[in-house]
Image: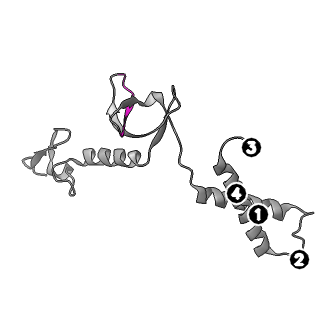
Amino acid sequence: MDYLEVKKCEVCGKTKHISEFSKSYPNRCKTCVAEHTRQMRAAEKLKAKVKATGEVIDVEPSGTMLVSCGSFITKDGRKIPGTALEFEKAIDWEQRRYEIAKAAMQGRLSNQYGDVLVGERDFEGVAVSSVEFADALIAELKKGGKG
């Protein structure tokens, strides 16, 4: 390794060997590119609820505040500490549908007194009705609130 081949990262300001620099971003070290990528992925579709007011806002990571906790910036420029926010988890409804349909099908096939009897098995019918059950349950869950 030739120690004379060094550059200064435009983000962190550290002087590093050229092998530690990104090919896509030639003036940024790989560490800074990785951190930037992590922040960009985390910022995608991030919604949070302000604990004190219940307001739901769009946010993106913006570094840290003096209290050494993560902070987020809203679309209108407000900077809010991460400790003041509750994050909503994105639900993968397709995965949830699969899990519910699988559980419904297992329940129907394990029921000895049910409509799936030995000799009269209609597995396609059981599969279709299990998916219909999952769809009905998901529709109810998406309504939110109390039933």
Dot 3 or dot 2: first in sequence order is: 2
Label 1, label 4: how far apart the Cα atoms are: 9 Å
Residue 124 is tagged as none
- Which sits earlier in the primary sequence, circle 4 or circle 2? 4
Q: Do the numbered discs 2 and 1 sit on residues whose CB atoms are within 8 Å?
A: no
Helix, strand or loop at label 1? It is: helix
Which label was assigned to residue 100?
Answer: 4
**Which amino acid, mark 2?**
Glu
Q: Quadrant of the C terminus?
A: top right
Residue for badge 1: 105
Of callouts 4 and 3, the N-terminal one: 4
Task: Let me know if residue 74 is in the magenta part.
Answer: yes
Q: Residues within 10 Å of mark 2 (few under 14, many from 20)?
A: few
Q: Is residue 64 left or right of residue 128?
A: left
Q: Which residue, as the protein is rendered here, is positioned at the far right?
A: 113
Which residue is rendered at x = 89% and y = 68% of the image? 115
Which residue is at 65% across, 61% downward? 98
Q: Earlier in the sequence, mark 3 or mark 1?
A: 1
When asked about the image quadrant of residue 65, the answer is top left
